Image: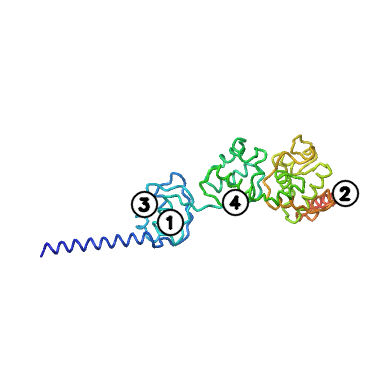
Amino acid sequence: MKRNAIIITFLLGLMVLGGILLYQAGYDRRMPNFRTRFELYVKPGTSVQEVMDSLMAGGRCRNSESLHRTVGKLEAVQPGHYTIDPGCASMYVARMLGGGWQTPVNLTLSGSIRSTRALARKIGAQMLVDSKDVLAFMKSNDSLKKYGVDTSHVFCLILQDTYQIKWTASVRDIFDRMAAEHDSWWTQERLKQAKRQNLTPDEVVTLASIVDGESHYLPEQPIIAGVYLNRLRIGMKLQADPTVNYCFGYSLKRILKRHLEVDNPYNTYRYEGLPPGPISCPPKSCLEAVLNPEKHNYLYFCADPSFNGSHRFAASYEEHQANARAFQQALTLRNKK
């Protein structure tokens, strides 16, 4: 009898243990184990324990033991960006981290991008890659050869946009992604629009970068694009101040007559036609302005005396001089005040 009781007790113990293990396995696989949505970034070399600490704090883990039974058993966690939703079970998160099932991040390129260094900083701030590596890539013709551009035409390849891409993407992967978006954006219709303006796609970007330097006021961009296209058609020098500022690394707060004499192929006061390449990475609004310029007979423009960011346009030099005097008088009065 005593022996039977021991056997029965042992069997009952096994059943209880089996039930516990089955419950834990079911919990680990199916039960939501986080209270909040959490964006987890895992850098190379991050330990499993550090990842679990982040999940405990950021995801507000419900059951730490479940986390230890699953994530804690991993030998290593794959670097990357992972989204932990409240509905995620511990086992799913473990498989996600162990298998590198990343959630793409948004790489957003917007605002003022007037140098490759500025672009490299924007990319490095949002991605795992080092901005120095990005800059070195853009400074290498060998790296850019694949995309049909050289170091002076990097901005011809890149659109201001938001790109969904893995956080751990290499520099080459990032540029492959941007090149794919570039090729997709330049549809047959846009290529026809560029041809109607007697421009290549690269020339469209170059002129758009000048328009961007002149005005961020969207309604005026097609008008300004029309001014420069009118000048190109009659063989008039573009005489664009942004190109002069580019020659000085955008260090000039005010462009004076002596600055217009700088001997640089990007100085459109000295050299006819478009500069050798873009002077910035223009937004799409400026690209569209060049492809769809406003038709008019304006050849000149200057800032409006109201200082509201708009411009006054003129077809004749005499009219332009009158506009310029009005602005200068307003500027002098403003400075006195």
Which residue lies at the image location 35% right of the left edge and 61% below the top edge? 26
Question: Which of label 1 and label 2 is nearer to you?
Answer: 2
Asked if marks 2 and 3 touch (Cβ < 8 Å), the reply is no
**Amino acid marked by disc 4:** Thr
What secondary structure is found at the residue carrying circle 3? helix
What secondary structure is found at the residue carrying circle 1? helix
Q: CA distance from mark 3 to mark 1?
A: 15 Å
Q: Which mark is residue 316?
A: 2
Which residue lies at the image location 33% right of the left edge and 60% below the top edge? 24
Percent from the top left, x then y, of residue 89?
Answer: 40, 59
Q: Which mark is residue 108?
A: 4
Q: Quadrant of residue 2?
A: bottom left
Q: Which residue is mark 3?
A: 72
Task: Tell which of 240 and 291 is nearer to you.
Answer: 291
> N-terminal of the two: label 4 or label 1?
1
What secondary structure is found at the residue carrying circle 4? strand
- Tell me: 260 left or right of 16: right
Percent from the top left, x then y, of residue 168?
Answer: 51, 46
Percent from the top left, x then y, of residue 64?
Answer: 37, 58
Q: Which residue is mark 1?
A: 57
Which residue lies at the image location 17% right of the left edge and 64% below the top edge? 8
Q: CA distance from mark 3 to mark 4?
A: 35 Å
**Amino acid marked by disc 3:** Gly
Question: Which of label 3 and label 1 is nearer to you?
Answer: 3
Q: Please rate how many residues cluster around mark 2, counting C-alpha atoms within 10 Å: few if below 14, some from 14 to 19, many from 20.
A: few
- Tell me: 40 left or right of 198: left
